[in-house]
Amino acid sequence: MTATPAPGTVRIGKAAVGALGLLAVATGALESVVTPTLPLLQRELDMSPAEGALLSIVLLITGALVTPVAGKFGDRYGGKRVLIRLMAVVCVGGMVSALAPNLPVLLAGQVLQGAMVGALPLSFILVRKHLPAGESKVAIGVVSGLFVGGGMVGTLAAGPVAEQLSRHWMFALPTIAVIGATLLVNRLMPHDPPGRPDDAGIDWPGLALLSGTLVTLMLVLALAADIASQPLVLGALIVLLGAFVTGWIAVERRAASPMVDLRMLARPAVWKSCVLTFVICVGTSGAVYLVPQLFAVSADGYGFGASATQIGFFLLPGAVAASLAGPIGGIAARRFGSRAVLTAGIVMMAVSLMALAAVHTEIWHLVVGKAVIAFANGLCVTATVTSTATSVDQGDTGIATSLVLVTRVLGFAVGVQVSGAILTAGTPSGSDVPAESAFVAGFLIAGAVTALSLLVTRTQGKGVQE
């Protein structure tokens, strides 16, 4: 058995970094297959729009909960050890999704797949431990870029695979790739030494209560459209949600090492960033969910009858725009300040959402609108993270930015569920196709909510500017 190397004595080569890159491509592809094929999955599994919305966000919610725990475990027990075990969970989840005969089983598979979101920070831990600072920055950039590239591959390939083979293979093929890449990482990546034990430990009660809060919130939003038929169930869930939130706040205030530091959240710079992130992601998620649904509506009505393959192709410009927004937003934040970039992104997004509500009769309307929204969201996220990171002490950067991450996931989840509920409520009795007015209402609400964030932006400092 190979001994664990001492810190700084083992350098990894291009092969090991390449294995991490392949894993990033495979996980990026597996993560992205649901979005372009969601209308197909809704038809095959007889899902309502609200249920489809739940399917599209459950992986992200799991990821937001797993990521901070995975990072702590990686520092404590070694990045490779935790990464391999995390990928084992992902592979099980991928196979469950591939074999799923119905929605509940598919949701379970997506919950397990959500562990993949913790793969990137663990990969970063590994390259930082095994490479000098300059080389590790390059390696982190390569792995991050390949993850985005994998997402584009999944977006393009999911439709053809689902239509030519089946929806089962749509999950199975990237899962097989994840298995192969994980085996390569296990073989080529040396073990990194565990860090010093953390006496504070993991905030398991806080994690459990936050999980219950998010799951209950999603159920409330999913059932909101059917409140007339089951008001008692919805009322009970609202009471349960209140109990989870109250318990979570009480636990986080007393925890020695809380999952979410509420004292940090009380700082104006942090809570303003969290409010902005939440509102912006609610608007962005409206477009993320509504545009593919509108593409799929029959061409006999007001839609385009696009197949899953065509939807993936139509969504590709948005994926490219999102990948470009990060570096462009970072450069712009240094040149003009974070507030200027944030304001520009919010205006672009709000105008695009309002425009989609008014004009959506041609495919290019949706393609261009979705691309502009994706680019604007990337600018906003970059500016918000930059502003948050430079508004707190260096030692608090990780805590503050993790709060923004959790808020981002929450905003995205709420926005998607609200959009799904709007389509469900706007579907005429006896039909499975929402009325066009439901899409108009969804885009208008997302645009109005996004525009409201300008009120918070005005109170922010200018941020980093050179």
Image (tube, rainbow, N blue to C red):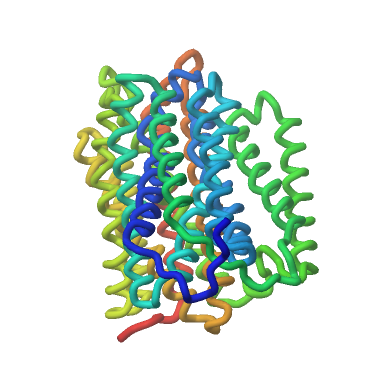
Quarter in which the N terminus is drawn: bottom right
Q: Position of residue 76 (x, y in %)?
A: 64, 66
Instruction: Report the number of numbered marks.
Output: 0
Q: Residue at x 35, y 47 (%)?
A: 25
Q: Position of residue 224 (x, y in %)?
A: 61, 35
The answer to whether residue 358 shows anywhere in this view is no
Quarter in which the C terminus is drawn: bottom left
- In this picture, is 4 found above or below 19? below
The answer to whether residue 248 shows anywhere in this view is yes
- In this picture, is 270 found above or below 90? below
Answer left or right for 88 relative to 211.
left
Q: Position of residue 419 (x, y in %)?
A: 47, 39
Instruction: Pick out the residue farthest to the top.
Output: 430
Q: Nearer the viewer, residue 346 or 193?
A: 193
Q: Nearer the viewer, residue 69 or 309?
A: 69
Q: Position of residue 58 (x, y in %)?
A: 55, 41
Answer left or right for 291 relative to 80.
left
- In this picture, is 137 found above or below 190? below
Q: Nearer the viewer, residue 258 or 339?
A: 258
Instruction: Pick out the residue farthest to the front.
Output: 1
Q: Nearer the viewer, residue 319 or 433?
A: 319
Q: Residue at x 50, y 81 (%)?
A: 391
Q: Residue at x 68, y 42 (%)?
A: 216
Q: Residue at x 49, y 31 (%)?
A: 52
Q: Quadrant of residue 20?
A: bottom left
